[in-house]
Image: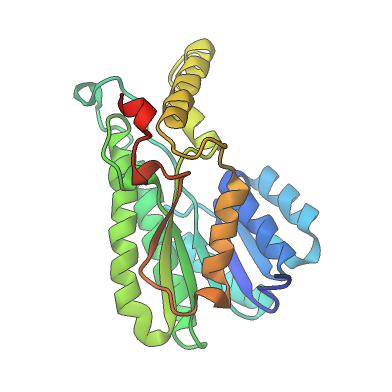
Amino acid sequence: MADELEGKVAIVTGGASGIGQAVVERFVAEGARVVIADRDADCGRALAASCGADAVFEETDVADPEQVGRLVVAAVDRFGGLDVMVNNAGISGAMHTSFLEDDLSDFHRVMAVNVLGVMAGTRDAARHMATHGGGSIINMSSIGGIQAGGGVMTYRGSKSAVIHFTKSAAVDLAAYDIRVNCLAPGSIPTPLLAAAAAGMSAEDGEQFVKAIRERMRSGRPLKREGSPADVAEAALYFASDRSAYVTGTVLPIDGGTVAGIPAQVER
C-alpha cells in the first residue's frame, strides 16, 4: 500500500542510523512527517536533509526526560500534532566473558537510555495523544529481552523491562485509544553489537562480532539475513491503521530464532 501514513506525524528516537534510520525512511516514503531524534547531530541532520521537507532533526538524549518532553513539544509545534511515537533509541552494555567480571559500571547509563527513555517517550507522547484522538506508540526491545542468555546482562534486563512496561502501558492507555506495541528484533546487522566490543582491540572486536553473528546464524531457522528494513516494515504495520485493533503485542523480527533451534543445530 502507498501513503499509509499520509497526514500522520511521527517521532523516531535513535533515528539517525541503523534500525531507526530505516524506520524514518520508510515512514517518510509512506507520507508521514517525521522528527528524527538522536545524539548524533551530523548523521541526524544529514538524514533529515536527504528526506526533504517532511523530516527534521532534533538533537536529543532520551536518558534525560526533560529533553524527551521538549522533543514532543517540538514535533507538535513543527508539524501540528503527534500520531506515532517510536521509542527506538538504545545502547548495548559492555561485553564480559563472565558475569562475575561485570563491574556494573554501565548499569545506570544502559537503564537510563533503554528503559527510562522508553518510559518518558511513552508518557510524553501519550499526554498529547490522550487529548487528540489517540495514536500509536512503538517501543523497541530485542529478542535478548525474551530469551535468556549469557553476556550483556544489563542490556538483556533492560530489554525485558521494555516488554513488560509496554504491556502495562497498553492496558493503561487503551482508554484513550492509544495503542502501545513492542518490536523485538534479532540478528539484525546494526552498530549496536560492535558497541558491545568497544573495550576490545580492533582485531579482537572484529573477531568477536564475527563469532556472535555466526552463532546467531546457526540458531536461526530462516537462513536469509534480516535487515533494518525488515524491522521498519513491522514498525509501519504498528504505525498504520492496519493495526487498529492490536495493542500490548510483542512482535519478534528474528527469522524464527525465539521459536526454536533448527534440528541440525540440536544434533
Which residue lies at the image location 79% right of the left edge and 66% below the top edge? 53
Q: Position of residue 177 (x, y in %)?
A: 43, 84
Query: Quarter-wise, where is residue 48 in the image?
Result: bottom right
- Kindly indicate the quadrant of the structure image that contains residue 149: top left
Q: Is residue 249 visible?
A: yes
Task: Choose between 69 and 214: the one closer to the eye.
Answer: 214
Q: Is residue 141 above or below residue 177?
A: above
Count of labels in the image: 0
User: Which residue is found at the position 31% from the left and 48% from the top?
Assistant: 146
Q: Position of residue 2 (x, y in %)?
A: 73, 70
**Residue nearest the observer in this picture, 113 or 193:** 193
Determine whether 10 is above or below 40 in the image.
below
> Where's the C terminus, which quadrant?
top left
Rendering colour mode: rainbow
Residue 15 visible somewhere in the drawing: no
Q: Which residue is painted at 68% across and 44% down in the image?
A: 43
Of the 4 image quadrants, the one containing the N terminus is: bottom right
State whether residue 11 is above or below residue 5: above
Q: Position of residue 75 (x, y in %)?
A: 61, 71
> Where is residue 248, by image quadrant?
bottom left
- Where does residue 236 sit, x and y in percent of width and height? 59, 64
Residue 137 in the image: above or below residue 260: below
Q: Residue at x 48, y 38 (%)?
A: 187
